[in-house]
Image: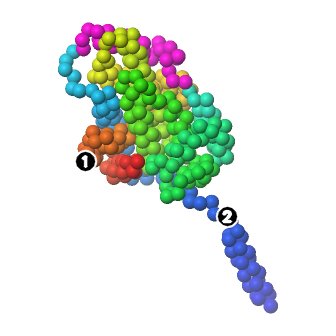
Amino acid sequence: MLVWSIAALIMLGAMGWWVAQRRIPEAGPAAPAPEVQTPQEQDEAHPMPDAPALLAARERVNARLWQLAYGAKPAAGALEKSHAEVRVAVVARLQPEKLNPEFLPRRPTLMQQLLREVSDPGAQADKLSRMIAHDPVLGADVLRIANSSLYRVTPEPVESIQRAIVICGVESMRGILATAMVRPVFKATGRNFPRLPRLLWERTERAARAAELYAIRTSPQDCFEAQMAVLLRALGPLVVHSAALDAYAQRPRLQPDANMLVELTQSMAGSLSARIAQEWDSSPRIVSALGDHDASALAVSMMAGEFLGTLSLLVMHAAMTDCDALDLSREAGLDESLAREIIARINAV
């Protein structure tokens, strides 16, 4: 009798568990969490590339992006005196250590709150939802990005912030939110070379996603900061663009020299991005990663994301072939299978 009673209790418990499971509402598919790997496993799966080689490759493809954006032709020779004077004026104005903060993009209002939430280990999805709810325009842009091919993982559109968090995951949603906050800075105007802000922003969205995908596979703890570093890196070229066109506006009879703008962007944008990062109270790790001498995992994820995002954009605009992009990835020292996977993912756009 005792044996039969125990058996009955076990059966009742199993039935209760089954009923309880049936009553749990379905939340929909959630973004898969990154696999947690030890540093040794990450190194064995995707060895860290040589940082100087990756830096040099990134600068080469960036130069091709600026040439595409400004419509620059091969330089014919030395600058004419009038253009050289403009260059001197721009360089003098943009010295990072002397730069007036008024020339820098303003930090988005909610950015500091977002950075605090990210640094809080207990940050939850409802906190992100409340932040976004304060600004309907920001919320609409977050949904636009979440529904883009860069992030979308379901055939049905994402129609609410709560659903976007479930589908994309909290980690990706932080990067999406930061991207949406920064986007208004890149609005193109009808002035000379309006293509630069548009192409730069298109590259930035791709690069931020590529940096996240790269960090997930190599240093998951750096996912959000790698995206933030990419966003900040994009602000330096924008400041150079604005300052140069302002200098030319004071000489209305002088047509801007596209090759000079490419050279100024290539030589000055990086230091300006680091200055902006400091003004925006970014973490010391991000500020360091924006320099050209940081070989940390965060810096490598940021450089790899920007490099792969630029390659994907150049391929899309027929400025290079897929084979060229993969050849450059190998020259940069990136794992070929990982580079191919990320380019294919973001080129789904």
Q: Residue at x 70, y 77 (%)?
A: 14
Residue 136 is situated, as x and y percent measured from the top left of the image, at 62, 39
Residue 226, position in %: x, y?
47, 38
Q: Residue at x 38, y 41 (%)?
A: 309
Is 31 on the left or on the right of 203, as rendered? right
Q: Amino acid at mark 1?
A: Cys
**Dividing the image into 4 quarters, which one contains the N terminus?**
bottom right
* Amino acid beneath label 2: Pro
Q: Answer yes or no: do the residues labelled 1 and 2 have beta carbons within 8 Å?
A: no
Whichever of labels 1 and 2 marks the residue nearer the N terminus, that label is 2
Label 1, label 2: how many angstroms apart (C-alpha)?
47 Å
Instruction: Specify whether residue 236 is in view.
Output: no
The 10 Å Cα crowd at callout 1, few under 14, some 14 to 19, many 20 or more, is few
Would you say 148 lies left or right of 116 here?
left
Rendered position, 61 above or below 160: above
Helix, strand or loop for disc 2? loop
Disc 1 element: helix
The answer to whether residue 202 is visible is: yes
Which residue is rendered at x = 76% and y = 88% of the image?
3
Q: How many marks?
A: 2
Q: Is residue 28 above or below residue 212?
A: below
The x and y percentages for residue 8 are 76, 84
**Residue at the disc numbered 1:** 323
For residue 168, above or below residue 185: below
Dot 2 alpha-carbon crowd within 10 angstroms: few under 14, some 14 to 19, many 20 or more: few
Q: Which residues are magenta?
A: 79-106
Is 25 in front, or is 318?
318
Q: Which residue is mark 2?
A: 25
Residue 81 shown in magenta:
yes
